[in-house]
Image: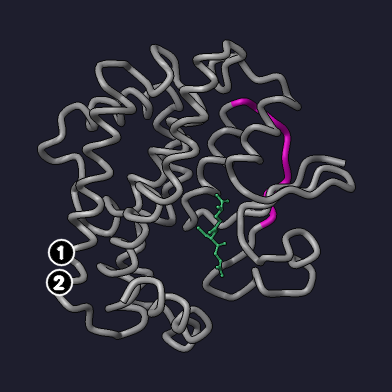
Amino acid sequence: MVLELYLDLYSQPCRSVFIFAKKNKIPFEFKKIALFEGEQYGEEFRKINMVSKVPAIRDGDFTLSESVAILMYMAEKFGTPDHWYPADLQKRARVNEYLSWQHSAIRMHGSKVLWLKLLIPLAMEIEVPKEKMDSAMEDLDGSLKIFEEKFLQDRAFIAGDKISIADLVAIVEIMQPFYAGEDVFLGRPKLAAWRDRLKAEVGPELFDEAHRDIMLAPEMAKNLDKSKMAVFKPRIVKLFL
Ligand SMILES: N[C@@H](CCC(=O)N[C@@H](CS)C(=O)NCC(=O)O)C(=O)O
């Protein structure tokens, strides 16, 4: 049975899993879980991931959620080139360090900007107070500064001169506010050069294929059937407003 990947490419952790699997020619079946259609809450998907979140995978009778765990599982199971998740103790620790930090930093701050800038005002039709947006941008700026100064420094990639799963996890999150209309690369030449190196390494076609949905997020947010957001509204308002 081929590996099943349950994904929606609007979701940033799904994009890292998708890019990694495709780049490494891991055979898989793409099982789309349309988040804005609420498909994550269906009984069938709950059997794969009872917390109703993507990405998730099924490998025979084994299921797994959490993008970081999935990336590590695929790297180990399919024996991908060492640089993705290096065996060297300290290089691996460098990758793990970033993966441990990002959840409550770049991930949280980048997706908050997307929700405040696009989905809350356009898809939920709730006005976002300016101070909320300013504060979200301040948090994102702070995380990006740490990313450049601590995690990237003068290296080509997070773990050194080769790309790793940490870089994939980072870029997909950073593209979220970018496609919401915040040019986070402007005035950050180091970050922009890293993005360009990463895109060249992954391959621009694959990079763009993974980002095709989120690239069109502003249009999607405008045209989305507003009733579909009702299921997310209480949680999103509590989290971000
Ligand atoms: N920590 C998880 C986060 C997964 C997650 O939050 N997925 C979101 C999309 S980015 C989701 O499926 N949300 C659906 C929902 O909450 O209804 C990971 O890295 O995989």
User: Is the CB–ligand 1 distance for label 1 below 8 Å?
Assistant: no
Q: Secondary structure at mark 2?
A: helix
Q: Which residues are magenta?
A: 24-31
Outermost residue, left side: 187
Q: Quadrant of the C terminus?
A: bottom left
Q: Percent position (x, y) of residue 148?
A: 25, 30
Q: Do callouts 1 and 2 mark residues in contact (Cβ within 8 Å)?
A: yes
User: Height in image: 144 above or below 81?
Assistant: below
Q: Residue at x 27, y 50 (%)?
A: 178
Crowd band around label 1 with a 10 angstrom C-alpha radius: few (<14), some (14–19), many (20+): few
Q: Residue at x 19, y 40 (%)?
A: 185
Q: Is residue 150 magenta?
A: no
Disc number for residue 134: 1
The residue pinned by badge 2 equals 131
Q: Quadrant of ligand 1?
A: bottom right
Q: Residue at x 49, y 36 (%)?
A: 99
User: Height in image: 31 above or below 82?
Assistant: below
Q: Is residue 80 left or right of residue 200?
A: right
What amino acid is at disc 2? Glu
Q: Percent position (x, y) of residue 74?
A: 69, 32
Q: Residue at x 21, y 71 (%)?
A: 132
